[in-house]
Amino acid sequence: GNSVTQMEGPVTLSEEAFLTINCTYTATGYPSLFWYVQYPGEGLQLLLKATKADDKGSNKGFEATYRKETTSFHLEKGSVQVSDSAVYFCALRRDDKIIFGKGTRLHILP
Amino acid sequence: GAGVSQSPSNKVTEKGKDVELRCDPISGHTALYWYRQSLGQGLEFLIYFQGNSAPDKSGLPSDRFSAERTGGSVSTLTIQRTQQEDSAVYLCASSPPGLTSTDTQYFGPGTRLTVL
């Protein structure tokens, strides 16, 4: 079946560090891939997406590349800020359903 | 404009009672989704509406859970005879019409349900 596996948190980094949050997926066909973010006290919101192999989604300094050969969609940011502290969810869309990973909590220390 | 709204924001109930959770999607959004977010777990898909019909109910965990949508707008998720394991945050999302509209779902703030 379709599923998403992402690295468990929490992840704690210092400000300006490089961030990678790993995400791999299992799916039939070619799903669209997403990263959603949930800031403290706020609702879930779309961060970025990629709809086909080799596409790169980017937003707010975050990037993720759709890698079909490794079935991965790792989230990266070159220099994190305290304001990036949140829970990040990797997800895939198959038909009309979005399947989410368990989320990775990120803490950025000043 | 107004986003997805959910009510109540918090609900505490006793085991065995029925609860109703409400979702008001963004105006004009034809698709509506219910998810459950339990502590330490990801978002668990419950049910999806396209208009007033629910083509996918596969995520409803038991027959105690039901949902309806009227007028292509407001949706109600009902949990009968609540159990402690039903305690979670229930999230609603909507997306606009269009071929790839499901790619972007707009989430409400959720209803935190606590079953004592």
Image (cartoon, rainbow, N blue to C red):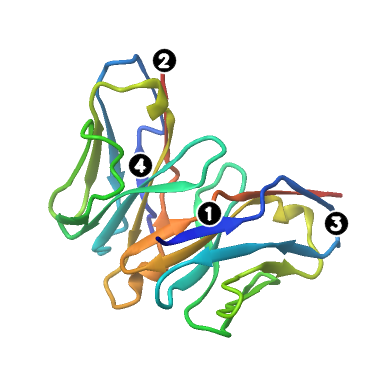
Mark toward the viewer: 4 or 2: 2
Q: Mark 1 and mark 4: span between their CA atoms?
A: 23 Å
Mark toward the viewer: 3 or 2: 2
Determine the residue positioned at 71% across, 56% down: A84
For numbered disc 4, what is the local secondary structure?
Answer: strand
Who is closer to the viewer here, A38 or A102? A102
Tag on residue A15?
Answer: 3
- Label 1 chain ID: A
Q: Are marks 3 and 1 in contact (CB under 8 Å)?
A: no
Q: Are marks 4 and 2 in contact (CB under 8 Å)?
A: no
Mark toward the viewer: 4 or 3: 3
Left or right, A98 with reference to A78: left
For numbered disc 2, what is the local secondary structure?
Answer: loop
Left or right, B66 with reference to A47: left
Q: Mark 4 and mark 2: span between their CA atoms?
A: 22 Å
Determine the residue positioned at 37% across, 68% down: A94
* Residue B95 location (% of width, % of height): 33, 64
Determine the residue positioned at 35% across, 76% down: B100
Q: Earlier in the sequence, mark 4 or mark 2?
A: 4
Residue occupied by mark 1: A101
Residue occupied by mark 2: B116
Residue occupied by mark 4: B6
Which image quarter: residue A29?
A: bottom left
Crowd rating for badge 1 (residues with CA inside 10 Å; few <14, some 14–19, many 20+): many
For numbered disc 1, what is the local secondary structure?
Answer: loop
Q: Are marks 1 and 2 in contact (CB under 8 Å)?
A: no
